[in-house]
Image (cartoon, rainbow, N blue to C red):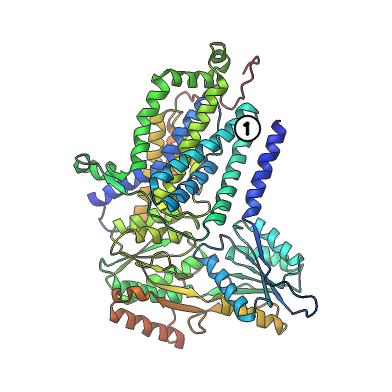
Amino acid sequence: MEGVMNSAIIISILATGIRLATPYLLAALGEMFTQRSGVYNLGVEGIMMMGAFAGFFATLHSGSPLMGIVASLLIGALMGLLMALVSVTFKAEQGISGIGLYMLGWGLSGLLYRLYVGGITSIDGLKTIKIPLLSDIPFLGPIIFDQNVLVYTALVLVPLSGFILFKTSWGLNVRAVGNKPEAADTLGVSVERIRYQCLILGGMLAGLAGAFLTIGQANMYADNITAGRGFIAIALVYFGRWSPWGILLGSLLFSMADSFQSMVQVLGINFPYELAVILPYVVTIIALAISFGRVWAPAALGKPFQRGTRG
Amino acid sequence: MKRVLALILAALTLLAFTGCGTNTNKSAETTPATKVEKVRIALVLPATVDDLAWGQSMVEGLKVVQKTMGADKVEIATSEKLGSAVDAGAAIRQYATQGYDIILAHGSQYQSVLMDIAKDFPKTTFAYGSGFATAPNIFAYDPQAQDGGYLLGILAAMTTKSGIVGIIGPVESGDAVKYNYGVQQGVAKGKADVKSRIAYTGSFNDIVGAGNLAKTQMSAGADILTGSSQQAVGAMRAVAETKGNYWLSTDMDQSSIAPDHVLAAQVYRWEKVVTKIIDLRKQGTLGGQHLILSLADGTIELKYNDKLADKIPAEAKAAVEQAKADIISGKLKVELPKK
């Protein structure tokens, strides 16, 4: 072991941690809205795969990652719409519909890639943007303000989601629909419409999370590129107790642990790699286990709304 | 209505899956008049046919075999994305039932499932690798990945400017361990004060994770990187985004997508292995042999990227060529990790 944990290494660990947190943050914030309205969408992983493909494909053909972002938002919205149709309008069991959506996304993204691209192809993805002045702040500057636009987007979305959810009338409606849909319905709030909106929003953010992987990180596409990140995002919604700040905390905890274990391995610090790679999961589970207090969840989560029945 | 929709979703899903499933390349249907004797080969892959790594290297090898022997003499069918041994087993059994002569299960994870199936089809030849356990109708093929790794390790140690060589590992098992162990020995041999650093992602197909690990390696000082498995392209892409850092490929030459960053490659010539299996089968040997891929018989090759020839110091190349000659003559034996 070498005494190499100097400030450059620590900055690298933290900056990488923020980058790694981005897809979780985007997808989990979207899923938070969805679940707040009373629907859990287990298809996040599938939507992310479609978003990853759409983002890659649009960037490959237009040469502009911006088009990739737009494409991933669109495809995410469509996937969210499909989930809404199945789980809200047709009131199908949400867990099963979500798994179906996941499998559809997995199969379809692989198929489309094979049909329209095929083979490993790389693209020019998003570049990092140094924010003037802020990036010069010692220590914090290179960690937070030297990232790509989707990282900034994810970070800005945290307070923004909090504001929307807790300070706007739409946010109030979302929370009402997820807790007491009958009451909301009585007051003239359309439960179905709110749930549609939330599922579409959640889909868009999951699509964006997928695009971050292809155009913001790998700059290429491969089958099953999400590698389980969508499911981790769902777990982080529970970890974060359906609050944007809690989700930020969970995403950062998980990703910082991941970034830290990579560096520990790279520096050759004597530690079994099998234990290192599970470190993020262990840290997250421990944090979840010791953070006691009332476990709150949207009361109507998972229950299809049927006017005239009690939830 | 709910039921109809569920059905449509299920059908769509199935459609999406089958679309990326089997792909039979029936080249030149045999004319009924003159029935040509044809070898029917089925290939089962854990990842994809175009992963620019383990899977694709075998696919390219089979294409060469087909081209050399004649498209009317060789039929090839491929099933990909069969990472789980249970799914792969179903495909293997199906191919055997359909009367394929040679079934290549291209992954070490298929060993036990092959042992099980092969008993039921004594006339079919099965092969898998990397591995060494055989049966009367099972060949095991086994690239000496450590040999090429050793040569690339010497090359890396004598080319690096930072004095650090970074290895991106998938999971500590099979071919990857052999390769990494070879690279480490080569680095130590190439230059005493150059360090090799290994880090694993814990996955074979997380290209984003491999890319991030490569970025971490580079931020900690590595300027020459390498790694095996299908996720390695993610790491290579991360290297290709930088200036002054280089990549060493294994399994196949990956310089096609990073021509300015891949210095050299260990390449497997599967066509020679498959041709040998076909010949042995013709002579009545259906299996039972442990087929070793090595530098000596040309089933493993070291390929330099001509475009970057000036980046490799002359003495590095000389040392690599010397070591290669020593491995071929048997004077030098690269060690394998102790089990």
Q: Disc 1 designates what residue?
A: A86
Could one spot residue A204 in this view of the protein? yes
Q: Residue at coordinates 28% horizontally, 45% vertically from top-left?
A: A129
* Chain under callout 1: A
Q: Is residue B137 left or right of residue A288?
A: right
Is residue B25 shown above or below A206?
A: below
Query: Which residue is more in the foreground, A185 or B279?
Result: A185
Where residue B203 appears, x then y in whole percent?
Answer: 49, 55
Q: In the rendered image, which quarter contains the N terminus of chain B? A: top right
Residue B308 or residue B325, whichever sits in front: B308
Q: Tell me: B222 left or right of B231.
A: left
Residue A236 seen anywhere in this rendered image of the structure = no
Query: Would you call the spot at circle 1 few (<14 residues within 10 Å), some (14-19), or many (20 or more)?
Result: many
* Residue A297 percent across, percent down from the top left: 51, 25
Q: Position of residue A91 (x, y in %)?
A: 64, 27
Q: Residue at x 42, y 43 (%)?
A: A69
In the picture as drawn, the residue positioned furthest to the top comes out as A187
- Judge whether B247 appears above or below A269 on screen: below
